[in-house]
Image (tube, helix red, strand yellow):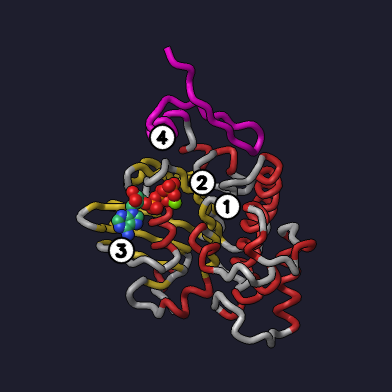
């Protein structure tokens, strides 16, 4: 059990910095994610988004500051007990997974907290779960395909199914729509939207570069630039042209249409 005072917090960062080679990759970040909130992290290349997700997933310890994840304080909790409660789908994960494994095996191995099939004796119930998650992500036709032969979009959907396999309380997605074509992006946004609105789905935090990738059901945004938080709060309040322009360092206009967002640069002159 964690600190009782923080039990309702999914994530609580206080003055967190990560310093490497004398440079702060993230600096004095204070951020709290409550149950039921679904956050988008926006920021330019190199802003510190992946670093922040690595802290939130307990794989990276901050240089200074305190981090509580799912009520447990980093540094006091056994991370090997904490990690199965967190689902991660990011660029780094795809590279660690064996290319020759089938899609079904790739998702199944998540249940055992390892990246390779050491033994082939999985429980039927796990296989059923893996099939169900893959079905939800539209991957039923690819169960026997080798992971290494998948297209970018197919790989991303497999990784999300894999991240859901341990029944996580917190789901972290690092640029899940990067590299997808327009149809693939819209398909993924729809699936993420369905997940975001599912009351029994985990808390979600998604890193992206594009406001077009924000699925309906996401509630909050954190904007980061050069390691520092520029804005954090409800989408309706914080995802403004002013904030987005400061975040990306050029004049931008952001618009909300229904439950979707778009942004574009202002013409020069
Ligand atoms: N181990 C490290 N040592 C030194 N610098 C690092 C290390 N890891 C990351 N960085 C640097 O920290 C900065 C933030 O990196 P990070 O990967 O968090 O950015 P990001 O916001 O995810 O960017 P992108 O949008 O390109 O994925 C970058 O300038 C990166 O080069
Ligand atoms: Mg990144």
Question: Looking at the rendered structure, which numbered label has been put on residue 176?
Answer: 1
Q: Which residue is located at x 61 percent, y 62 percent?
A: 159
Counting residues from the start of the chain, the first of labels 2 and 3 encountered is 3
Tell me whether the residue at label 1 lies in contact with that at label 3, contact meaning CB atoms closer than 8 angstroms.
no
- How crowded is the residue under tag 1: few (<14 C-alpha within 10 Å), some, or many (20+)? many
| Cα distance in 3D space between marks 2 and 4 | 13 Å
Quarter the N terminus occupies: bottom left
The reply to whether callout 1 and callout 2 are in contact (CB within 8 Å) is yes
- The residue tagged with tag 3: helix, strand or loop? loop
Disc 4 is placed on an element classified as helix
Residue 121 image offset from top left, x and y in percent: 69, 87
Q: Which residues are magenta?
A: 241-269
Q: Is residue 132 above or below residue 208?
A: below
Residue occupying the point 59% across, 35% down: 261
Say which residue label 2 marks: 208
Q: Cα distance, mark 2 to mark 3?
A: 22 Å
Is the Cβ of the residue at disc 2 closer than 8 Å to that at disc 3?
no
- Specify which label sits upstream in the sequence, 1 or 2: 1
Q: CA distance from mark 1 to mark 2?
A: 8 Å
Label 2: few (<14), some or many (≥20) within 10 Å?
many
Residue ID at (58%, 32%): 262
Q: Is residue 260 magenta?
A: yes
Callout 1 touching callout 4 (CB < 8 Å): no
Residue 197 visible to an observer of this rendering: no
Would you identify the image quadrant in which residue 243 lies? top left
Q: Which residue is mark 4?
A: 248
């Amino acid at each position: 059990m964690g600190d009782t005072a923080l039990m309702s917090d999914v994530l609580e960062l206080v003055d967190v910095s990560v310093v490497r080679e004398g440079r702060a990759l993230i600096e004095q970040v204070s951020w709290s994610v409550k149950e039921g909130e679904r956050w988008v992290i926006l920021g330019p290349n190199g802003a510190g988004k992946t670093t922040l997700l690595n802290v939130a997933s307990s794989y990276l310890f901050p240089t200074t500051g305190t981090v509580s994840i799912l009520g447990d304080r980093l540094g006091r909790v056994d991370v090997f007990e904490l990690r199965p409660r967190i689902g991660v789908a990011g660029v780094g994960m795809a590279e660690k997974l064996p290319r020759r494994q089938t899609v079904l095996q790739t998702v199944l191995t998540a249940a055992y907290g390892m990246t390779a099939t050491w033994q082939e004796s999985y429980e039927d119930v796990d296989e059923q779960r893996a099939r169900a998650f893959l079905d939800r992500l539209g991957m039923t036709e690819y169960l026997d395909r080798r992971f290494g032969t998948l297209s970018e979009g197919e790989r991303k959907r497999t990784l999300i199914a894999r991240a859901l396999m341990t029944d996580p309380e917190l789901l972290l997605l690092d640029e899940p729509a990067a590299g997808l074509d327009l149809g693939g992006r819209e398909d993924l946004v729809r699936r993420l939207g369905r997940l975001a609105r599912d009351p029994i789905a985990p808390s979600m935090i998604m890193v992206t570069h594009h406001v077009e990738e924000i699925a309906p059901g996401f509630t909050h945004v954190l904007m980061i630039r050069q390691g520092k938080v520029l804005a954090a709060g409800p989408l309706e309040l914080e995802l403004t042209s002013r904030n987005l322009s400061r975040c990306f360092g050029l004049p931008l206009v952001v618009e909300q249409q229904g439950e979707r967002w778009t942004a574009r640069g202002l013409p020069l002159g």
